[in-house]
Amino acid sequence: MLAIANATIGEAVQEAAADGWLNAAIDGFGCSWAFWLATGLAVRLALRAAPAPASGWDLAVGAASLAVVALPADHIASCIAAPLAGAWFAWRAGPDDPRLRAGALLLAALAADLVWVNAAMVVAGAPIEALDARASAWFTGAVVHGNAIAFLHGGGGFYVARGCTSINNIALALLLWFAVTRSARPRMRRGDLAVAAALALSVAALNTGRLALMSLNAQTFHLAHGATGSPIFDAAVTTVSLAWALWDVRKELFDPVLDADAGPAGHDRGLESAAG
């Protein structure tokens, strides 16, 4: 978690200095509130993991991660160290400690959201941006050239940037879904993939609708993309992500007997324990 803090605190302080603490807080201090919620849930999973002595390899991986974090390029170095450390401790935890394993995988996912999603967009961003532009134009009939969309009414238009693509928003939504579901039920189950797919489609629909609204004219563009529309859209993505995540773990939330760590037969074992 030190690597995640090292990669985010600097940007958070800079945004607060530039926009004021209140505006920076509304914007999620340079990340998003979904990201910070996922970070808190990762810490919660680690604290609830079964205590176990650290091995020599554990200490070595921790020391190496600290050394990488201390490099001058702290942001990139931290986001390299975090997924490697997360992968190591997820492998070390194995099936015997699902909370530690889930927390370690969530740590790796947090680092992926910080750097590797953006890195992937640098490589493959152009066709993804163009695909989003054409998806919105399919509903509105707007003229599209690559990732550029012309306004339907009035002159001008806009470009679909990386931060406005469906993939970027889906990645953040899946991060929040994974954090919430693994916090309530550390073990994955087959139905999780179907819920993740439904969440991705929901966020893609929200993003396409927003781009379609932005393409009407300059006024709707500034409404949907400005100081009012952007926080509303972020809140909508967060709400949809939480709704799907809570639906996915509804049994664990409302059944006090269900053993979230026990797998498919956990409920029966919990009943037997209670009866005994």
Image: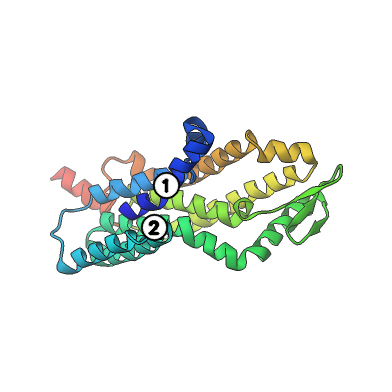
Disc with the residue nearer the chain's start (2 vs 1): 1
Marks 2 and 1, how far apart in space? 10 Å
Left or right, residue 76 beside residue 199: left
Amino acid of disc 1? Gly
Determine whether label 2 and label 1 are within 8 Å by CB. yes
For the residue pair 21 and 215, the one nearer the viewer reads as 21
Q: Position of residue 57 (x, y in %)?
A: 19, 69
Residue at 52 percent across and 40 percent down: it is 239
Q: Secondary structure at mark 1?
A: helix
Residue tagged 2? 74
Residue 94 shows up from this direction: no
Amino acid of disc 2? Asp
Residue tagged 1? 10
Residue at 63 percent across and 46 percent down: it is 206
Of the numbered discs in the image, which one, if any, rests on residue 107? none
* Residue 41 versus residue 65 in the image, above or below: above
Residue 169 shows up from this direction: yes
* Residue 56 versus residue 140 in the image, above or below: below
Q: Position of residue 123 (x, y in %)?
A: 59, 68
Label 1 CA crowd tier, 10 Å (few <14, some 14–19, many 20+): some
Q: Quadrant of residue 82?
A: bottom left
Q: Position of residue 65 (x, y in %)?
A: 29, 62
